Image (cartoon, rainbow, N blue to C red):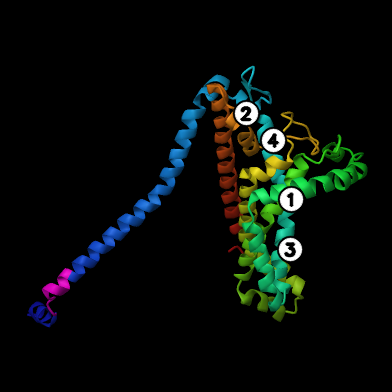
Amino acid sequence: MAAGAHAALTPALSPTAREFGSGANRGDRVFEGVVSLVAACVPLLLLGIIVLLLLDALPALVRFGGTFLTQTSWDPVKEEFGAAAYIYGTVVTSLIALLLAAPVGVGCALFIAEYSPLWLRAPVSFLIELLAAIPSIIYGLWGFFILAPIMRGAVEPLLKNSLGNVPVLGALFSGPAVGRDLLVAGVVLSIMILPTITAVSREILRAVPDTQREGMLALGATKWETIRKAVVPYARSGIVGAAILGLARALGETMAVTMVIGNSSTQIRPSLFTPGYTMASAIANQFTEADKEIYFSAIVSVALVLLAVAAVMNIAARLLVWRVARGPGAM
């Protein structure tokens, strides 16, 4: 009886309503299939790139094996290839860029988010975004014609005279100052990644809830104490992510580095005044000269190593962000 009453009270769907519901469900399924296909394209594209690089790099990998990563000799005439010097140059220039750009970028972001007046905030933010949009070749030309002479004539001699005699540290600033070396390349990269670190860190700091600041100020903390103990700890995982984004750009930068790094040595030396290569600049310089199969395969192997280094750095970054995020105040 109750069931019959419930059925009587339930309005029957008209054929039009049933067709509309069916059509809506069909549309949802189609949309879900489309977006799933689009999402699947990303890992498939990465897989395709890896497979292509592996196939082209296979002759060099089979011939040289693990020595390709430890050998510094790069002689196309003798068909001897090793990427150790290129890996070293990539890591050194990227670390220099990160060490120089990260403190400055975070400091700029703190100024914009916490200290800058409203009338100045928008113009400064626009200039930072403009710097991030400048093509790398422009940075390369500026580095070649402006920065390199300054580094050669003033900065590098100063570093050599003041730090060259310091034990251990002096080895980094030994040798002649040529102005086209690992140090100059690292400085150019630091300027290139500075807008990225600043812009991302600024948005992270602005996303910190005002209750974090107001709570500290209500307890009698100063502005600096509020930033140090409430704002920065809350945003630190995002700031680390901003630094890693900048490092990712530095690892793969090509044209600007190619113009200022010297491209004339495959020796691993502690001195930052050594002209050298990064993996990206080596590929750009020698790709058109690869007239032998093994030479071409060796260059593609360098590209594969660069991809692997980028992947390792990103995985390490995710682990670092995850570890930082576990701490108090993580976002």
Q: Which of marks 1 and 3 is nearer the N terminus?
A: 3
What quarter of the picture does the C terminus occupy? bottom right
- Give the residue at mark 3: 107
Left or right: residue 45 versus residue 163 is left
User: How far separated are the C-alphas under marks 4 and 3?
Assistant: 31 Å
User: Mark 4 belongs to which amino acid?
Assistant: Tyr
- Element assignment for label 1: helix
Within 10 Å of disc 2 (Cα), the crowding (few <14, some 14-19, many 20+) is some
User: How far separated are the C-alphas under marks 2 and 1?
Assistant: 33 Å
- Give the residue at mark 2: 69
- Give the residue at mark 4: 277
- Image mark for residue 160: none
- Give the residue at mark 1: 142
User: Mark 3 belongs to which amino acid?
Assistant: Gly
Left or right: residue 149 versus residue 308 is right
Q: Which of marks 4 and 3 is nearer the N terminus?
A: 3
Residue at 20% across, 69% down: 21
Q: In which quarter of the image is residue 264?
A: top right
- Element assignment for label 4: loop
Mark 1 in CB contact with mark 3 (< 8 angstroms): no
Residue at 73% across, 42% down: 260
User: Mark 2 belongs to which amino acid?
Assistant: Leu
Residue 244 position in % (x across, y down) = 62, 52
Residue 64 position in % (x across, y down) = 58, 21
User: How far separated are the C-alphas under marks 2 and 3?
Assistant: 38 Å
Left or right: residue 179 versus residue 204 is right
- Residue 301 to residue 155: above or below: above
Q: In which quarter of the image is residue 284?
A: top right
